Image (cartoon, rainbow, N blue to C red):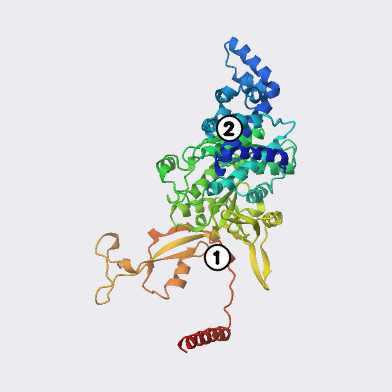
Amino acid sequence: MATTNPNLSSFIWSVADLLRGDYKQSEYGKVILPFTVLRRLDCVLEPTKADVLAEKALREKAGLNPEPFLLRKSGQFFYNTSPLDLKKLMGDQDHIGENLRAYMQAFSPAVRDIFESFEFHTQIDKLAKSGLLYMVTEKFATIDLHPDVVSNAEMGAVFEELIRKFAELSNETAGEHFTPREVIRLMVNLLFIEDDQALTKPGVVRSLYDPTAGTGGMLSVAGEHLASLNPDARLVMYGQELNPESYAICKADMLIKGQDIANIIFGNTLSADGLPGKVFDYSLSNPPFGVEWKKIEAVIRKEAEQQGFNGRFGPGLPRVSDGSLLFLLHLIAKMRPAVDGGSRFGIVLNGSPLFTGGAGSGESEIRRYVLESDLVEAIIALPTDMFYNTGISTYVWIVSNRKPAARKGKVQLIDASSFWQKMRKSLGSKRKELSPEHIEDITRLFGDFKEVSRHVDGSPVPISRIFANDVFGYHTITVERPERDATGKVVLGSKGKSKDKPMADANLRDTENVPLSDDIAAYFKREVLPHAPDAWIDTDKTKVGYEIPFNRHFYVFKPPRPLAEIDAELKGVTDRILTMINGLTA
């Protein structure tokens, strides 16, 4: 993994000293991040600057659109057509604001979009008003960020360090756009573990997609990780992000790392998929937990109704108060078909997608679809207090349409909730982290695909369990009991289908969940009839449901303490209370 250049980081950080007083700490990033990007691009384009300007004049004279020629001349995914650069801007202190604006306007549209999403023009105004614009620009103009001096990997590492620092300073939103690096490393390990080709074959190209890209952390870590395993492999990255500033940071980070930023899209992935029809080898996502989707409900329902399984939401829609499962369905639609080599993705979800919603509900139907389609490889429970903005339990789902033979028809559940170490310093809600050893252990548990227990206080506690897909399915049967009149006689129907048949008493109606592996009639005879001999099943109301009661599968029975021990403890407490009362009344 690339290390951050300490001199470069501290230089960029020293700009914060200039801003102190005029800017709040949490606002430093709004100035430093876009300026870092601007200087990097300035340095990258420097060697081809004269050629690009000459090419522009030549093509415009011939009446041609110069853009494709300029990209070729710059040798990058972007260009700038201004005769100015940051060093030249320093020569005209009185017009620094308008010249800086003119220079930025001369970038190719994809780069201008980055600065617009940063709302950089607002910062230029603010810096000018504070009398800081020339000083800050001059500071950046003096540092050499050319790729020969600072590699893409180093630059990316510096940029990520800055993002992380600013995320910590404005703690209230840190978690929204930021997934802890060690969680991403774990997910990336699990994604690549079975893909020997990507890990060993020279020149292999793979695509990776994040529909909730944030500041691009998942894409970056995945890229670094694959490069460390196979320097000859190339990961082409795609993403979409809803928050303008995060989108700008992500796009800038990708640009700095030499990725094509046309693949990073702004907007709401669920209501306006920016990469329609595209499929990917891998995807990673940490969507927002438990966020309602009322604002986009009409668009989502329309797609579900009109396109069904040809769209993204054919299997069902979750309740409006929690859109997590919509992201799961979206990612399934983005998988490269199995016949073309297939796909695997990792998504972080909270507990509710595992079990919310009974048989026939949208959530249950989505679980039914992914399990009956044999797409779930594993679900891993992470420790609590792992994320910046929430302390709740979280789960990583690994989903694939190219399961290895041993995994077919099965789901592996891994309870990694005890794999953590305390952080030296808490960040928001994040108090725990995974060490490299924990990541290795969890990766091994997944890779070995075996049932594993560890011994705690002498008794075995399961940490990896394997189940057939249908273990999570059940039939919900509706059990009816007859209505009786005042004399206790069964009331019979008088017309239609129910003529001369016992009428059901709605107050006595009950439901039972019967495991899919059980025969309904045998279950009914065994579990219901002994207690209610007059009951029957209303077969029209039978529904199939699926839930994944994760904790139940890892529950370890602890026998209660001996009664004598509890009695002795109670007696001790009672005696103490009596002594205290006597002391008060004495």
Relative to 574, 86 lies left or right: right
Q: What is the number of callouts on the image?
A: 2
| Relative height, residue 417 to residue 125 (above, below) | below
- The x and y percentages for residue 271 are 46, 40
Q: Which mark is residue 72?
A: none
SS at mark 2?
A: loop
Q: Can the viewer see residue 336 in this picture?
A: no
Relative to 370, 161 lies left or right: right
Residue at 24% x, 75% y: name it: 486
SS at mark 1?
A: helix
425 vs 114, nearest the viewer: 425
527 vs 230, nearest the viewer: 230
Q: Which residue is mark 2?
A: 132
Q: State the quadrant of the N terminus.
A: top right
- The x and y percentages for residue 311 are 48, 40
| Relative height, residue 47 to residue 184 (above, below) | above
Indicate the quadrant where residue 111 lies: top right
Amino acid tagged 1: Arg
Relative to 493, 4 lies left or right: right
Specify few, some or many for label 1: CA neighbours under 10 Å numbering under 14, 14-19, or 20 or more.
few
Q: Which residue is mark 1?
A: 552
- The x and y percentages for residue 345 are 60, 46
Amino acid tagged 2: Leu
414 vs 212, nearest the viewer: 212
| Relative height, residue 478 to residue 258 (above, below) | below
Specify few, some or many for label 2: CA neighbours under 10 Å numbering under 14, 14-19, or 20 or more.
some
- The x and y percentages for residue 553 are 57, 64
Q: CA distance from mark 1 to mark 2?
A: 60 Å
Indicate the quadrant where residue 482 lies: bottom left
